[in-house]
Amino acid sequence: RSKKKAFTRYEAANAEAADGKRPKDKDLANILKYATTIRAIAHTQPDLVKLGPKKANIFETQINGGSIKDKIDFVTGLFEKQVPIDAVFEQGEVIDTIAINKGHGFEGTIHRWGVTRLPRKTHRGLRRVACIGAWHPARVRYTVARAGQNGCHHRTELNKKIYKVGKKDEKFDSKVAYADF
């Protein structure tokens, strides 16, 4: 373990001076003067959930509502604090989710696009597309299945409804949740 204490320079740089001002106040004044949108950088706490990943996800989120001063006051009030899930989302809200799907690396056409295998006695391999297009146009069209990267793509799913925001060990009745379709 390190014998040095972490963040000592950070604390010293951001400590209040005798006149009650902090060095960050100058930066906040510039943000208030010039900024049109306010965004906050936050991270998850995967060690609280005993699942696979241990590395925190760092993300940037935009702050909406009110004037620029209201947004800055809201964000600075949240510095170095945990934000509970019920402060962000509420029951019955419809949201969009953005994520990167599972990566499978470089894959062939059979697995990547689900095209049919060629017969057993095919010359030059059977896990490929038989015809990749006509003579003219003298190029391969984008609609033809080709080998390449499979997965690890950026995807957005729209209109996901939040049915419940609950506490740990709280029971959830799925029959009640899905009754509003």
Image (cartoon, rainbow, N blue to C red):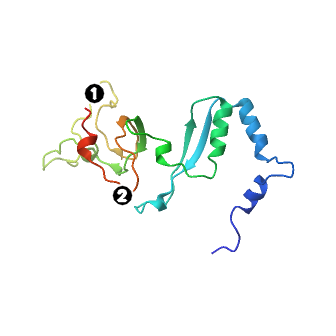
Between 131 and 86, which is closer to the camera in this rendering?
86
Extreme-top residue of the structure: 136
Residue reaching furthest left?
120
Left or right for 82, reference 166: right
Quarter of the rendering occupied by the N terminus: bottom right
Q: Quadrant of residue 7?
A: bottom right
Q: Position of residue 38 (x, y in %)?
A: 63, 35
Query: Type of residue at label 2?
Result: Asp
Mark seen at residue 113: none
Amino acid tagged 1: Trp
Total numbered labels: 2
* Circles 2 and 1 in contact, beta carbons < 8 Å: no
Q: Position of residue 116 (x, y in %)?
A: 18, 42
Q: Is residue 115 left or right of residue 90?
A: left
Q: Residue at image x 68%, y 33%?
A: 69
Q: Farthest right residue?
A: 19
The residue drawn where x is 62% and y is 31% is: 37
Residue position for label 2: 169
Residue ID for mark 1: 135
Q: Position of residue 159 (x, y in %)?
A: 36, 33
Distance from disc 2 to disc 1, alpha carbons, whole Å, reads 64 Å
Secondary structure found at label 1: loop
Q: Secondary structure at mark 2?
A: loop
Bin the neighbour count of mark 1 within 10 Å (Cα to Cα): few under 14, some 14-19, many 20 and up: few
Quarter of the figure that contains the C terminus = top left
Q: Residue at x 26, y 28 (%)?
A: 134
Above or below for 16 versus 89: below
Is residue 56 positioned above or below 100 on the image? below
Q: Is residue 138 above or below residue 17?
A: above
Which residue is painted at 70% across and 68% down in the image?
A: 5
